[in-house]
Image (spheres, rainbow, N blue to C red):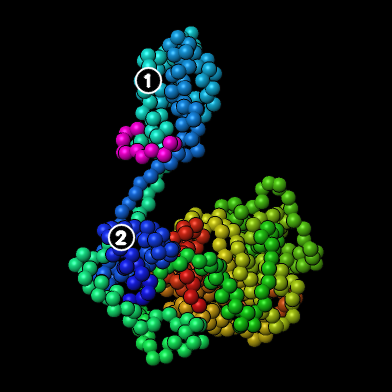
Amino acid sequence: MTEGEQTVLRELLRLEGKNSAAKIAGEISQSEERVTSILNALSQKGLVFLEAEEHVSYSLTQEGEEYAEKGLPEKRLFDAVRSKGGSCLLDEAVKVSGLSQKEKGIAVNWARRNGWVQIRKEDGSTVLVAEEEEIQSPVQTILSEVKSGRSVGESDPLKQALDRRLIQEMRAKTIQAEVTPSHVDAVKRLLSSGTEGIGDLTQEMLLSGSWRGKKFRSYNVESVPPVTNRGKKNPYAEFNDWLREILVGLGFTEWFGPYVETEFWNNDTLFVPQDHVAREVQDQFRVGSPYDHGTIPDKKYYRAVKAVHENGGDTGSTGWQTPFSKEVSTRLCLRSHTTPVSMRYLWEHRDSPQKMFIIDRNFRCENLSARHAQEFNQCEGIILDQGLNLRDLMGYLSEICRRVGIKKIKFKPGQFPFTEPSVECFAKHDILGWIEVAPGGIFRPEVTRPLGITDPVLAWGIGSGRLYMAAMGIGDIRELYTRDLQWLRRSYFVR
């Protein structure tokens, strides 16, 4: 046994019978948490019998404190009616009793339910008539008893006070411990035999050499340590940081962009038709108040994008064969993906080679479900260089998935307005099955030629939330943003 276990056992034998961990801790000047841990260890050895006792206590809420001091609203209302001879107008009774507008409704409701007053209509006015000469309010009595610190037992008035949230219930468990009766003699023999070897090797032992010739107690390396709720980063945020490290390690440069975008950057530069359904308010958040328009920083680039939409410009495409509206192009919206950041980056970095990524939030009008959220993080990446092809893109996506721990992926052809050819990368999720995590492709000439870029540009938009779900086996995307402390405390991201 350890010295701590011996100390606790000696104290239990001295105190006799059942004793709480708090009492033992006070007697031996140790923390209750340490004594509880020692008692659990002794219980596993069969030397101590533990019993958990639950204690219920009550305290007044803020509203209960107020009513305990001034009286329940219904009682104050009844007293006001009696002071007016047993009958008076409702407004007069409220004024006399000093009730607030909030308390007025509470008072009338409970006074009528208790049978204390009757409500009548006389000449279009509401009149209250007292039904009793005197009243007793058990709920008022309960409030007074709780305020004075007296113990109260279960009763209907207590239940009513709890339902009305005038009183709050607090439950606490205490550990009661005693030496196992059948092991008392064995415990005494163990205590008389002393400690079985050194458990803690201290600095003093090393300096004095007192450890020489002593036995050392063996350690159980398979024992489960107690759970500690220490501060740590949110596991999903930790995952995104790791994803950043992976991409930086692959030679990418991190970039950033604004949340509020013009539709020029969010859609037009990506060759998304101005009448595309993705631009509707059902899919895209649009800035409504104050309603304003953004500016176009590069008039030459704007004219090139406009020409591509209307007739294909110099790309060889026929475009969308529809007029291009500056009104639509300059409208403000919340970015629905991080690809406009890629376009802003290419606008500033047009020469090969380039490798850029961004991990940041985006916003869409989605129905909240296990797989979709209105706000989500996306890991956007682009590579600009000579001789790139679809196989290079699939290789990068496969490598990223492999590094975050996803073991099964598959690709299938995809279709997006701004890439051709396009692919969709799916990851195998233990609960949800195959989920899409990394759509991507090669930017179309209609996207890159207005910038004067002729080399191929690989692009993808990885849903980092879905990637995290697939890597960690999480079945509901809402858990990524949960405030559940129990989930956050037990969830760890292991690299």
Dot 2 amino acid type: Leu
Q: Main secondary structure of the magenta part?
A: loop
Q: Is residue 193 visible?
A: yes
Q: Name the residue rendered at 37%, 74% in the picture.
A: 3
- In the picture as drawn, the residue positioned furthest to the bottom comes out as 213
Badge 2: how crowded within 10 Å, few (<14), some, or many (20+)? Answer: some
**For marks 1 and 2 on the same chain, the one whose residue lies earlier in the sequence:** 2
Measured from the top left, where is residue 77 in percent x and y? 46, 20
**Which sits in the foreground, 59 or 421?**
59
**Which sits in the foreground, 85 or 90?**
85
**Which sits in the foreground, 428 or 33?**
33
In the picture of the structure, the residue carrying the numbered disc 2 is: 15
Measured from the top left, where is residue 19 in percent x and y? 31, 58
Establish if 321 lies above or below 129: below
Establish if 309 lies above or below 355: above
Badge 1: how crowded within 10 Å, few (<14), some, or many (20+)? Answer: few
Q: Name the residue rendered at 25%, 75% in the picture.
A: 189
Magenta segment boundaries in residue numbering: 147-157
Dot 1 amino acid type: Ile
